[in-house]
Image (cartoon, rainbow, N blue to C red):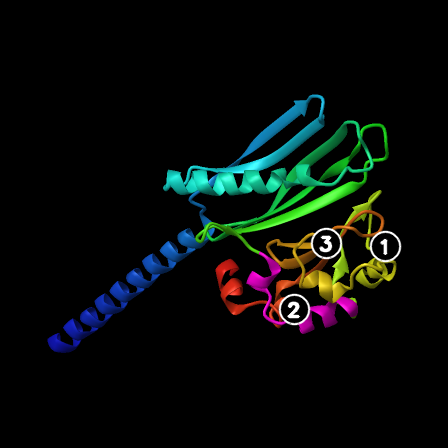
Amino acid sequence: MKNKFFLKILIIAVVAGISSVLIHFYSLKLKEKNVLSMSCVRQDIQLNDERGDIRINYPQLSEMDDREKEKRLNSLIEKDAMKILERDVSDNEGRFTAGLDYDIKYMDDQAISILYKGWFGAVGARCPDIAMATSIDIERERILTLDDVVSDYDQLYDLLTADKFENITKWDGVAGQYTIGQDYEYKEVSTLMEDLNGDDEDIEWYIDDGHFVIVVLNGLPDYNEYAISLQEAKGFLQKEFLKKIN
């Protein structure tokens, strides 16, 4: 009788110990997944000189354990945001005006995805609305291109042309006025597939917590964002990338 009693106590103790270990391990995983080891601060640049009137806001990482890595990543983000100043204003010999503000669409310890919106044009002329998107692999310290994340361009193309992506850009508070097919109806210089396989000058992309988004930089009227759920994007996105953001 005594032996049975001690056996029950032993079993209860073992089960309780295992449960405690599992709960502790699970808590660590949740902490690892949900708590960032860094944050972002806003960086503002305003210039007004003979060249132009420029206002650019972009994020900078802070509170990383590796401060040297933080500096390298911030330099990468800053340099990428400044590419707006490389735009062509050849039809204007005078000053130009440019502005950008940002929205961090996704951030964890593995990746950050940033959407910039603003304007660019000659002073005194109509300034088109513009968009730029940047996604960065934090571990590898590099900007990710479509080639880095897409495994099947044919499937991506098919989904885009079948209007499986939703237009999420809002103009005057209304979204979804154009399809990507309409964006490309008027284009004579390049096709959608050529731009997908291009140099990111016509198409960029970003992710948020639940979507993969293609940004047509020269759209109707000025740019458009087309979103599809990450679940539906699994067929054309690389598995390594999906693991990084899940």
Vertical side of 127 occupied by 246: above or below = below
Instruction: Tell me the residue that label 3 is attached to.
Output: 202
Q: Nearer the viewer, residue 40 or 147?
A: 147
Identify residue type, mark 2: Glu
Q: Is residue 230 left or right of residue 194?
A: left
How much space separates mark 1 and mark 3, taking CA atoms? 20 Å
Instruction: Tell me the residue that label 1 is attached to.
Output: 177
Disc number at residue 108? none
Q: Residue pushed farthest top? A: 49
Q: Are marks 2 and 3 in contact (CB under 8 Å)?
A: no
How much space separates mark 1 and mark 2, taking CA atoms? 22 Å
What residue is shown at x 76% (from left), y 36% (from top)?
120
| Magenta segment | 145-161
Q: Residues within 10 Å of mark 2 (few under 14, many from 20)?
A: some
How much space separates mark 2 and mark 3, taking CA atoms? 24 Å
What residue is shown at x 65% (from left), y 56% (from top)?
199
Identify residue type, mark 3: Asp
Instruction: Tell me the residue that label 2 is attached to.
Output: 232
Disc 2 vs disc 3: which is toward the camera?
Answer: 3
What residue is shown at x 72% (from left), y 64% (from top)?
194
